[in-house]
Image (cartoon, rainbow, N blue to C red):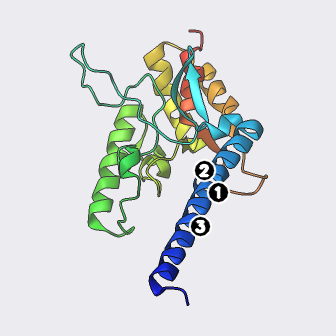
Amino acid sequence: MPHPLSAVVRQYVAALRLLVVLTVITGVAYPLAVTGIAQLAFPHRADGSLVAAHGRPVGSRLIGQRFDLPPGGGRAAGAPDPRWFQPRPSAGSYDMLASGASNLGPNNPELVRTIKARRAAVAAFDGVRPAAVPADALTASGSGLDPDISPAYAYEQAARVARARGLRPAAVRALVAAHVQGRELGFLGERRVDVLQLNRALATAAP
């Protein structure tokens, strides 16, 4: 008759073997297979849809970012740079570790005050009437990392960008029009403009 202790040892050894096999399959083989297939079939997307300039990544088409004034020169570092198109507000300041919404309801007094202040600030920054400021310039997205803005907000910023860069307003508006993306499959979502892609094209625009 087998000793009870040896039976227990055999069970532990079998469990350990199963743990090793499943770890190799699900923790090594499967991730490597999925990564390899993704790299072969969709290499750009698998690497994070990165956008490069002069051979160096400057951002991702999937994650929004700020375009602020650099430090130095007596300018207000961290303030929006008038030479660039600006993204919509972010509850987490486009910090990927703080991704998320404000969770404030539409009638929350704090949100109402914030929207009022944003409307005044955007109108003054872009040189437009407060009533002309689109909704996505006033409210943050659910993730706080939205890379896109509405065509209306992009066109609203065109005159300010043109003035700051010494470009013709018509040329900047044409640049916006060239970067308006349609709805997915023709009916899902809304028309949009990727801010990073638009600003990369703006960086190479001739005066």
Tell me the residue that label 2 is attached to. Answer: 28
**Where residue 164 appears, x then y in whole percent?**
43, 18
Tell me the residue that label 3 is attached to. Answer: 18
- Is tag 3's residue or tag 2's residue first in the polypeptide sequence? 3
Q: Would residue 169 be visible to someone looking at this image?
A: no
Inter-mark Cα distance, 1 to 3: 10 Å
Quarter of the figure with the N terminus: bottom right
Query: Residue at the left extreme?
Result: 74
Q: Are marks 1 and 3 in contact (CB under 8 Å)?
A: no
Q: Are marks 1 and 2 in contact (CB under 8 Å)?
A: yes
Inter-mark Cα distance, 3 to 2: 15 Å
Closer to the camera in the image, 56 or 130: 56
Q: Amino acid at mark 2?
A: Val
- For the residue carrying disc 2, how many other residues have a C-alpha within 10 Å: few (<14), some (14-19), or many (20+)? few
Q: Provide the secondary structure element on which disc 3 rests.
A: helix
Point 49% across, 40% down: residue: 64
Tell me the residue that label 1 is attached to. Answer: 25
